[in-house]
Image: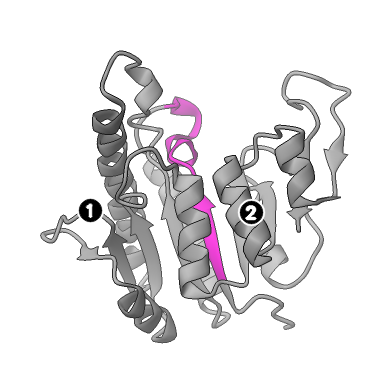
Amino acid sequence: MNIKYSRVLLKLSGEAFAGEKGFGIDPKIAIRYAQEIKEINQLNVQIAIVVGGGNFWRGRMAPDMDRATADYMGMIATVINALSLQDALEKLDIQTRVLTAIDIKDVAEPFIRRRALRHLEKGRVVIFAGGTGNPYFTTDTTAALRALEIGALAILKATKVDGIYNKDPLIYQEAYKYKNIDYLEVINKGLKVMDSTAVTLCMDNKIPIFVFNISQNGNIKKIITGEEIGTLVN
């Protein structure tokens, strides 16, 4: 089997864990993601994952709260999702490590770049939690930053739709899907793929972003093996 990307970073939003409930964690969803990640791991592809926390907390839920405090709460929410995914993966006998940017040493390792690389080289799935460890940065920016730090060849941005559209396809039937789009066009058109800081980081360092539908089984493997699905930002 032809493997196009031997080391990737998968970005999973917090909402992706909630399923149709919209809040919390659906264990069946976590297991399904774990099964897909296991399939990639067994292809000897090194995979790291950045998880969001929006299924538990987003700063905009409390607009009157101090922004830094709200962001730290969001970072803690990402740790909950990371531990859930770790549990699902280890039930499938996949060695997994959770690395956090904020110190929660009783449940996860601190993020140290060389340690993360060593885990990947040993075939372990690495889950990054706690964002960047700083307020005012999104988990999209975390994904771009961690991808660069570990030398990932691509970022796989999991969404509820099958790519990037000029309008919300869930609302507008006439929405147009982009097969390929460049970084500047994403920024200039204000397309809500990743925040502008994340896209700029990827642009400056020439790392491609694949935006795809995570709800369809096998899509991660299709990207790894070079099939054209979703939208490629490069």
Q: Secondary structure at mark 1?
A: loop
Q: Is residue 219 visible?
A: no
Q: At x 29% / y 58%, what residue is drawn? A: 87
| Residue receiving disc 2 | 217
| Residue receiving disc 1 | 102
Q: At x 72% / y 73%, what residue is drawn? A: 225
Q: List x then y, in percent, for residue 2.
A: 74, 82
Residue closest to the eye, 199 or 104: 199
- Residue 123 found in image quarter: bottom left
Please report the bounds of the magenta region as a residue range: 8-22
Mark 1, residues whose alpha carbon is within 10 Å: few (<14), some, or many (≥20)?
A: many
Residue closest to the eye, 179 or 133: 133
Seen in the picture, residue 136 relative to 23 is either above or below; the reply is below
Q: List x then y, in percent, for residue 12.
A: 49, 49
Question: Hey, what amino acid is under mark 1?
Answer: Ile
Residue closest to the eye, 163 or 113: 113
Q: At x 36% / y 49%, what residue is drawn? A: 131
Question: Hey, what amino acid is under mark 2?
Answer: Asn
Q: Is residue 204 left or right of residue 135?
A: right
Q: Quadrant of the N terminus?
A: bottom right
Q: Quadrant of the C terminus?
A: bottom right
Seen in the picture, residue 207 relative to 139 is either above or below; the reply is below
Looking at this rendering, what residue extends furthest in the top direction?
A: 64
